[in-house]
């Protein structure tokens, strides 16, 4: 179907005075005595294109006046003081009718209401803006890491290991509801892979394999967690960016993470000014200033031990008490970043007992070289650590957790054959998107959110 993108019409003065064909969905319609107006959107830009219909000139446009209808318009492009440019219609063809029961009739619907119709909510301004930023952010991540010499690798989605020894893995099986097997061993031996398999919670362990050959690598793909937590920040299926860097210690990887966050936010500011203005107006006052200040200021760094002291001194009652050794809850994380530092903060050197087996043990014998990046409004967006490169210490940490050493043979070999200091982090793609857009529920930055008790 020969037509011109609405975006081209707005960006290209060449079309003024020319006859053009445009397509789109009707977003508003207004009728007066001799003239009617339509605003259409074709998804190529956030802006709607106004169509002016002189009733005498155009026949059979009634069906085009319905919200949600899809139309093809032929007309002359003219300059307009209010809209920049608009189209005076010569003819209108309705491609698809849209009857009155189209659910998006109001100008603004609540996000909760829109969640009930993931297939239609994408046609609203909010989702148009979210997904445009999501796409720009994804490209910015690839561009940034590629420009720094990182090799993009794809780690397996189905795995035979569970990255952290945690129990939140979705199982992958071809077995039916009823099986003839009497024991667990027999059950798994007769399953598709001949052993227990699941969906990956993280590509890190395989990412380390690649980093031990290519130096700097990253993954960008889905991770799956069967977390039974119904929060505004957890999905069962989320997108995960996991850089892994050889010859890098904790301060090196912190620098990489900070620089990457700044670079990608800077790109979004540059490429999505209309969308950011929209989020500023409807979702988070001060958003643009916040993002600009991220780009031009240093992030804070605080020792876990000091963070605990600060929390104990806080003039605030927390639901969960905290003491040295406890894991920080969302309320603690948000207090640290929102009230104490008022900017992104790396909390470093956590107690080893609350962190994963692969994290490098510090000389104090109590902590590991791990850090979480906390940001105002969201909480944790990055989990990061230097990895334990010493074979004996790694085995000791695995034994302390009663892990089956034989399941990690490849991982252990990395420490046996030319081990090097290395570090990496995991950035939650939807979490950073929440931060950049000011949208406060992770379900609203995802096309089809999967959460506990909900799939569509
Ligand atoms: P949280 O404490 O917020 O549950 P985590 O410590 O379990 O996160 P990590 O294992 O450190 O998460 O994963 C790295 C990053 O992946 C997190 O910092 C976060 O940005 C993102 N992430 C983790 N779990 C989820 C989830 N269920 N939904 C969306 N993003 C997630
Ligand atoms: Mn974490």
Image: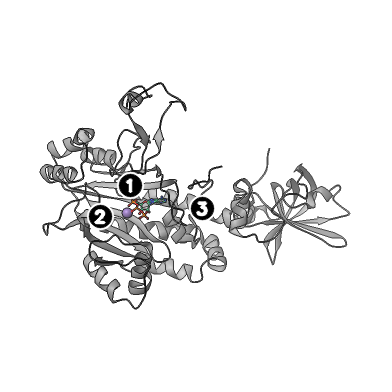
The N terminus lies in which quarter of the figure? top right
Which residue is pictured at 32% across the width and 41% down the height? 203
Q: Is residue 338 above or below residue 5?
A: below
- Residue 33 appears anywhere in the view: yes
Structure colour scheme: one colour
Counting residues from the start of the chain, the first of labels 1 and 3 encountered is 1
Side of 317 where 367 appears, left or right:
left
Residue at image position (41%, 48%) is 227
Residue 242's disc number:
1
| Front-most of residues 20 and 413 | 413
Q: Which residue is mark 3?
A: 443
- Give the number of the disc on residue 354: 2
Q: Quadrant of the C terminus?
A: top right
Residue 335 occupies which quadrant of the picture?
bottom left
Query: Residue 174's spot in the image, x, y percent?
Result: 43, 26
Q: Nearer the viewer, mark 1 or mark 3?
A: 3
Q: Which label's residue is closer to the chain start, 3 or 2?
A: 2
Q: Nearer the viewer, residue 164 or 40?
A: 164
């Amino acid at each position: 179907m020969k037509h011109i993108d609405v975006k081209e019409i707005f960006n290209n003065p060449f079309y003024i005075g020319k006859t053009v064909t445009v397509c789109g969905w009707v977003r508003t319609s207004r009728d007066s005595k001799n003239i009617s107006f339509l605003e259409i959107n074709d998804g190529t830009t956030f802006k709607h294109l106004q169509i002016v219909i002189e009733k005498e000139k155009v026949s059979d446009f009634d069906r085009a006046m319905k919200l949600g209808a899809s139309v093809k318009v032929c007309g002359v492009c003219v300059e307009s003081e209010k809209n920049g440019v608009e189209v005076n219609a010569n003819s209108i063809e309705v491609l698809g009718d849209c009857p009155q029961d189209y659910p998006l009739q109001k100008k603004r619907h609540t996000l909760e209401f829109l969640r009930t119709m993931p297939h239609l909510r994408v046609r609203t301004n909010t989702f148009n803006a979210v997904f445009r930023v999501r796409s720009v952010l994804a490209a910015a991540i690839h561009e940034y890491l590629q420009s720094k010499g990182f090799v993009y690798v794809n780690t397996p989605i189905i795995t035979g290991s569970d990255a952290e020894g945690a129990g939140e893995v979705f199982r992958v099986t071809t077995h039916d509801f009823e099986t003839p097997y009497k024991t667990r061993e027999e059950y798994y031996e007769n399953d598709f892979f001949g052993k227990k398999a699941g969906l990956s919670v993280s590509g890190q362990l395989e990412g380390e394999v690649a980093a031990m050959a290519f130096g700097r690598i990253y993954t960008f793909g889905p991770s799956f967690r069967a977390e039974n937590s119904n929060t505004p920040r957890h999905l069962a299926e989320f997108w995960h960016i996991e850089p892994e860097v050889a010859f890098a210690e904790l301060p090196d990887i912190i620098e990489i993470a900070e620089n990457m966050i700044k670079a990608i936010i800077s790109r979004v500011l540059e490429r999505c000014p209309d969308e950011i203005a929209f989020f500023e107006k409807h979702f988070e006052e001060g958003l643009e200033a916040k993002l600009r200040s991220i780009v031009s200021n240093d992030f804070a760094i605080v020792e876990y031990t000091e963070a605990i002291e600060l929390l104990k001194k806080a003039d605030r009652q927390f639901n969960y008490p905290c003491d040295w050794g406890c894991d920080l809850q969302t309320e603690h994380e948000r207090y640290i970043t929102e009230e104490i530092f008022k900017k992104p903060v790396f909390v470093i050197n956590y107690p080893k007992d609350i962190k994963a087996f692969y994290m490098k043990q510090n000389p104090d014998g109590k902590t590991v070289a791990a850090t979480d990046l906390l940001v105002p409004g969201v909480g944790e967006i990055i989990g990061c650590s230097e990895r334990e490169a010493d074979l004996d210490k790694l085995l000791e940490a695995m034994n302390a957790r009663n892990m089956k050493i034989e399941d990690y043979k490849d991982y252990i070999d990395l420490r046996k054959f030319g081990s090097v200091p290395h570090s990496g982090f995991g950035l939650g793609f939807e979490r950073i998107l929440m931060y950049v857009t000011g949208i406060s529920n992770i379900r609203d930055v995802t096309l089809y959110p999967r959460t506990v008790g909900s799939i569509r």
